[in-house]
Amino acid sequence: MSTQPRRPRNVLLIVVDQWRADHVPHLGATHLRTPNLDRLCREGVTFRNHVTTAVPCGPARASLHTGLYLMNHRQVQNWVPLDRRHVTLPQAARAAGHDPALIGYTTTPPDPRTTAAADPRFLNLGDTMEGWRPVGEFGPDHDGYFGWLAQKGFEVPANRDDIWLPEGEDTLTGATTQPARVPRHLSDSAFFTEKALTYLKGRNGKPFFLHLGYYRPHPPFVVSAPYNDMYRAEDMPPPVRAATPGAEATLHPLLDHYLRNTRQASFFRGGEGMAADMDEATVRQMRATYCGMIAEVDDCLGEVFALMDAQKLWDDTLVIFTSDHGEQLGDHYLLGKIGFHDSSFRIPLVIRDPDAADQAGRIEDAYSESVDLMPTMLDWLGADIPPACDGASLLPLIHGSRPADWRDALHYEFDFRDTFHSRAETDLGLGMDEASLLVIQDAQWKYVHFAALPPLLFDLTRDPDEFHNLAADPAYESVVRHYAQRALSWRMRHPDRSLTHFRASPTGLQSRLKKPTQ
């Protein structure tokens, strides 16, 4: 038996907000400069076909932190509570003797059956998921950040969100090269980074499990100097969209709704007008600012990585870089994370496993989903994976071996029931539980099934940008039937499995655990 002490097992889970998969240089985004993400890609495995299984923030993070599909965890919108019965990533890690700490946020409203209607957490779109030990919360309404600003001596305006107005402007009616009013050293990204450095310096040699969240490149689309003009609008790729918003709207009623109702004000502080009215020059400038926001986060990660190097933590830590969801960024005349397009659902995933150094720099093409991250981290720590988990550990893929039963398609869902800021359900004449869709997608076909609206079918080999719906074409009837049946079979394989592995027997309670079917 070896007398060598077991190496510590640390986890650094980096979750940025609204970072699209096509903004990773290692995967071909040559217009970006991200030296620290590049380092992670060189030393880890980058997943080419990775999606969040739900949008927006709350549902996406619920899937990431429970390993459950939207149809099972049912936090279907940001403002919808998460059922307390679900085992979360921090709870499972804590049960195995780890101390999960959180910097950032999870957008998780509490289960109302465990509190009261007067609980102030129901006044905002979500608080911190149970199980995490907050060491740098953004906080509801960003209270943690604004308090930090005030403590640093920055004069916070009466309307606190005005720090994201550009310098010298009272309003912002579109994309700009002007820097944000808040300086670089006091940005929200600097806030999260300082909290991370403080946490790592204070650990006193103990192993760590740290969720490091960043708000960027989430809107408002404005960033502090020098990142505001780091990229030129003319160097940005143009948006993928039809000739006019009207032509785009003919594809589907849900797309038509968002084209008529998505306003710029949610993306530019004080902005006016509709997202669909943004011309190409404005979209390109917005994209340049978005890339500047990415550059700021990358510089911040460099500070964290440098400290880990100095503390000799790098080779004892599983480092995961991902996002909660993507961003339309003007594609199909849309902004935000909505609908069914790849721009909203495809996200980065890079994992550096110090036990898989021989795989460094590799790009993995297997289909991976956000529900896989919870079992991956628990597997790496040697902790139990909850039986209900829909995802599967990515460690075999990271080590260069694809399981024979690995999934052969991507799956994701979107629930568009009414919230206080969106009325798609009412506008489309649907019931609350009819306002939903699911997607099954492989290399050739993307099928979108709606609970109460017409389906969509795209041939991705001929129509990669999803402009031509083939679902109503009789020539593709068999393809629609095949993918609808696959979607149904997928749902039937993934009902709640919390207790289905147990059974009574003449000798007492038995358990028959089985890994999830992909």
Image (tube, helix red, strand yellow):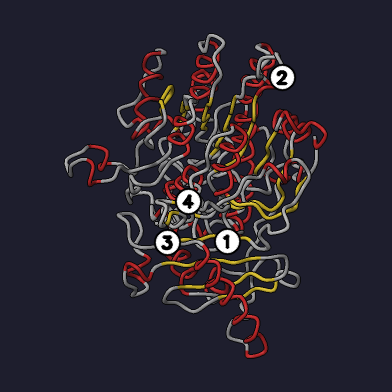
* Helix, strand or loop at mark 4: strand
State the image coordinates of residue 108 (x, y, percent, origin top left): 37, 42
What residue does disc 1 label? 411
Q: In this view, does 289 lie to the left or right of 1?
A: left
Q: In this view, does 317 lie to the left or right of 142?
A: right
**Number of the label disc, if any, that sits on residue 1:** 2
Mark 2–mark 4 CB contact (< 8 Å): no
Q: Are marks 1 and 2 in contact (CB under 8 Å)?
A: no
Q: What element carries label 1?
A: strand
Q: Which residue appears at 64% of the width and 15% of the height?
A: 307
Q: How far apart are marks 4 and 3 (CA)?
A: 34 Å
Question: How far is the residue under mark 2 from the one under mark 3?
Answer: 54 Å
Q: Which mark is in front, 1 or 2?
A: 2
User: Outermost residue toward the right?
Assistant: 358
Q: In this view, does 369 lie above or below 216?
A: below
Q: How far apart are marks 2 and 4 (CA)?
A: 31 Å
* Residue that appears at 35% across and 47% down: 82
**Disc with the residue nearer the chain's start (2 vs 4):** 2
Of discs 2 and 3, which sits in the foreground? Answer: 2
Asked which secondary structure carries label 3, the reply is strand
- Mark carried by residue 415: 3
Quarter holding the N terminus is top right
Return the disc, 4 or 1, that comes first in the chain's sequence.
Answer: 1
24, above or below 33, in the image: below
In the rendering, which numbered label is found on residue 511? 4
Instruction: Choose mark 4 or mark 1, whichever is in front.
Output: 4
* Separation of marks 3 and 1 at Cα, in angstroms: 14 Å
